[in-house]
Structure formats: structure tokens, C-alpha cells
Image (cartoon, grey):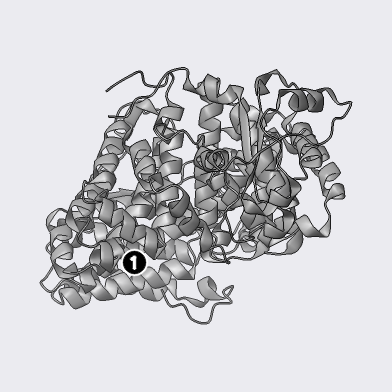
Amino acid sequence: MNVSLSQTLGVLLDSDDIELVKSTLHALAASVCLESGLPCSVMHSILRSSARATHLTRSRRLLQVEMMSLDDTTAGESELRKRLEALASLSIGAPDLDLKELCVEQPAADVS
Amino acid sequence: MATVQPLQFAVLANDFRFSLPASDDDVDSSAPKGLSFTKFNRATSADTVHPPPVASGDASHAAAAEASTGPKRAVSNLNRGPRLISIKNFRSIRSSAAELASNLARDYRVPSSSLFALKWHIRLLRSLDTVESRRDLVSIKLLAIRAGACNRFGAPEIPSHLLRDDPKVLQHLADLVKAGSVVTVRIQTDAVRALRSLWGWRSVSAKLKDLGILQQGLVPMTLHRCIDVLSSPDPPGGYVHLAHGLLWWAADLVGSAHTSSSIDPGEVMDLVLLILRNNAMRFSGILAMCCHVLQSVFSARNGNTHTARFHENKGLELCLDRIKSLLHVPATLDAVSTAPRSTAAAGPDLLADADRGAALFEAAPGVRRSVLSLFMALCHRSFERQRTAVRSNYLKDGTFSSILLHLWRGCFAISRHEYTAGRDSSGPTSMQLVEPLQSSGVRITTSSSPDNTSLFWGPEVFASSCELLCSVIHNNPSLVKHLHNEGITDGFLRSLAPVRIRGLCTLIVFP
């Protein structure tokens, strides 16, 4: 993966737009690039179509602004990996609360 | 049993705590930047609550500064353990997550490596009020697990760090898959895909086996439920993707030696045949994955037993029926394939629909051709592993030879350019070359759309079909005369006529 692509993905993951973050992760996870090693151009096209799907016109402006503020230390693939890891580790942290209970309409009442 | 209070989200969201590495120098680049309250608890017990060092005019910052409590820590203690940012009445702060994170980063001298995690912790705590936003966050976590785990370019630490920091994560993912209607299908699908991606790592697969999740039949049971839903007259959206994810994982599980005792390939094969029997199930992605699973079953230990069972259960007939249906190109595909450009500016709703993505996949060039090849390769494989002669009506009633003859007519149809030229000069058109074939009472119809290039199957499909024919004859040589009488020999030679193959650049094809 080239630096500019990793950089772009990293910035997208940092967005306040939750839909954009989900879409970026989708593109990352579903991309044949990652799972079968196809060229980056495929990844770019997947990302572009994914970006279209999440009405990126507004987010693209945001992206341009944020890209300009990036310095060398936050660019590249290692930063992208760190960001992925941080998102994968997202946790509410309460010991008795699992993912399923986060997804239900009303958290389960006392079931003991 | 675990007790969960309904208001726990609100309580948690009201106070903000975030642990930091002791200093920039102590930042461990290999350590996860995830967030959890267990870390905070450790930090609290170590008496490391850190107040805001500098006040500023910014309202959010002022609120944060005023709200913070706790003993001030000496600078010399910085390297003793993690620092902790603690903010009371966190929800009263109105600034955006990015602004607040930026202020906190400045005031608490948060290292740049922790800034992203800090920002997401703020977003997380602000999203706990509604079930939709909580689901969004769970989706993000699941997608990140999947993206991180499938990144073969060099992120092996993600799965191991994930297991280290949250030992229950696999059980929680399995619970999501098993949850049924309690959680959305989208979340279940993401959980299945995350598990599949994680399973590729040896440490995770061993852990999954230890937990007994696979032995409890997680994959077959969920797949069965999925098939039931998809078999209903008007199935709700999303289940196709769930089935696709489950089949993908099933193929991996069946094909793996170290989980062979955790899943029964025969049971998985029966489920796949159930899908193939359901004519309503036409999504190419599912069909391709069915082929993938059956190939894995045939390759598993005792593969010969499984091929015998496949033929006993009319697997060949099911595959040939699917090949026939793939030869019929719905006219609606053209409309779907041109839709994204025309609706791209219309707004997000249409294009954000996952089912629309599935339709676009269906219409993508080459998808049907690939699925066709997969089915023929699967049939070939089933014959290859079969030691006794396969008895099937389709081999004798002309269905098999009709399919091959029809395919061969479409494999080397003239190119689009020649088609156009031929039409202009009132010469033979591609439609005449692939016209509906009627033989031995079997009729196969194709689309009448002259612009649909899906009808030109190409040399790969031709090679796959020839390979299948060879394996059929090898399996039962007595069929040769029968096939010859049905025109297979003539059809084969005709398909190699110079007029048909002159436009080909392919020298040789290995199916």
C-alpha cells in the first residue's frame, strides 16, 4: 500500500463523520487488495466508490483540510495500523457489558 | 450471572477518564492504543490522577479544567505509571470531539500517538445514549477488527493484542452471531466476518477451538437460520450478506486440518445443497461461495466419501440446473449496471443501500462467467474424486450435452466490433450464434438483448467445460457413444472453427 493511500485512509478513519468511518473500514476490510493482494489501483477504486456511497462531497472538503495539516509523523501505513488497532480495541470498559448488550434496544435488566 | 443496570451507559458517559502513557519517551509503539476502564482502574489505584496544568479562555477547556479533580502529581513521578485525564460532568462540554481532544492534548501534553485514541474515546462516550449510535460504534469496532486482522501486509500484532486486552472478545463476537433477531443482521454479518478474519491467525483459531464455539455448531446453526429466512417469500434485506459471510468462513473451516474435528463437512455440504435447491437464491456471490465450500468439502479428509454423498443427493443435477439458469441473462442487469453513474448525484440513501451493492456486484462484468466456471470446476472435481460411475439422468436425457453445446456456441461468439459490423452488413449476428437451443426436450433460453456481452463466455469457460466433459467420460466411458450421438463431437469441432476463434489472443488456457 503506498503512503498517500495509507495517509488518506488514516485521515478518513479520524473523521467525525461516523458513516464515513464505517465506509472507509468497509472498503479496507472488504477490499480484495487486503485479502488477495491485488494492486492498489483496485483499492483506490473501491475506496472511491465507497466514498461516493457516503456522500463524500462534504467529507472531501474536510479531508482536504485535514490532509494539509498532516505532518510526516502521522503519515503512512504504521499510523494506519495503529488507528485500526485503536478502533478494534474500542471498549466501553465496563466488565459486565458485552457487545451484544450494546446493540440491544434496552440494556438487559437484572437477570441474576 | 452477570448483572447489567439499564442506566449504566449514562453513568459511564457522565464522567470521562482517559489514561496516557507516562511521557512521550515511554510511548510503546507496539502497545495497543485502545481504551478500557480496566486500565483506568489500575491507574486510579496507582494514585495517578492528573489535573489540567494550564487554564485557557476556551469554554470547553475551561469546563474541563474546572471539572477535573484529584491530587496533583509531581513531575518527578511522571515515569511511575500511566497518567489519567479525568473530567467530571463531561456531558456538559459542548465542543466537538476533535476540538476537545485538541484542547486536552495541548493542556495535558498528550503524545501524538495517543491523540487518535483520545478522540475516539470522546466519541464513544458521547454515543452511548441511543441504540443506533451504540450499534454504529460496535460496527466500527467489528469492521476495524476485520480490517486489522485481514491486513496481511504486516499487522500480526492486532489479533494478539486484541486477545490480550480483551480475553472475552471471541466469546462476545460469537454471542453477537448467535443473538438472532436481538441484534441487527448487519452487526451479525460484521461479527461473522470479524471472526473469520481473526480465525486466520493460529493463536485465535486455537483459542476458538478451546472455547468450544465451533463445536457447538455456531456456523451450521446460523447458516440454517439464514437459509430459513432467505427461503421465505419476501426475505428481509441483509441476510444474503450474512449467508455469504458464513459460507466463506465455513469453507475456511472445512478446508483446515486443525479444525476438522470442530465442524462436520458432510453437514456443511447438506446445507449448501439446500441453498442450491432453492431457486429463489440467485445471488452470484452466494452461488460462488457455495462452490467454494463444496470444493473445500471435497478436499477435506475422506473427500471420496463426500463426493459420493454429493452425487447421492443429486448434487450434479443441482449444479447443472444452476449452470442452465446462469445461461439465462436477465434483461434487468443492464439497467442495474448503468445505475450508479446516473444516481451518484441523487443523494446518499440509494447508494448506501447494501442490497444495491449486491445488485451492482451481480451486474459486474465477468461475475456470471466466473460463477459458471466455478460450477463446472466443481462438477469436474466431483467426478475426479468419484471412484464409481456416476448415475444421473442429466447425463442420459440430453441435458448435459445441451448445456455444453449451448455454452460452446457462446464461448467464441464474435466480438462486439464484429457483431456491430455484422449487423450493419446484415450478416450473422451474435444472437444467431447463441440462439436458443432445443435438444432432446431441453430448452435453454437467453436474453434477447444484443448489447449484453455476458453471453460471450470466453476461452476460460470453454476450457472448464472441456475439462468437465473429459472427467465425465473418464468416469463412465460407456457414455461416449451416447454423447457423440447427441452431437458433442460435432459441436466441439464447430466451436473451433477459424471464424470463431480468429479474434482470440489466448494461446492456451488452463482451467
Percent from the top left, x then y, of residue B428? 55, 59
Q: Residue at coordinates 59% horizontally, 43% vertically from top-left?
A: B337
Percent from the top left, x then y, of residue A111? 29, 21
Circle 1 — which element? Answer: helix
Quadrant of the frame with the C terminus of chain B: bottom left
Say which chain tag 1 marks: B
- B184 vs B485, nearest the viewer: B184
Residue carrying label 1: B377
Q: Residue at coordinates 17% horizontally, 63% vertically from top-left?
A: B306
Q: Residue type at mark 1?
A: Ala
B267 displayed left or right of B5: left
- B144 vs B285, nearest the viewer: B144
- B391 vs B364, nearest the viewer: B364
B255 displayed left or right of A79: left
Specify whether residue B141 is in view: yes
Asked which quadrant contains residue B28, the reply is bottom right
- Image height check: is B105 above or below A44? above
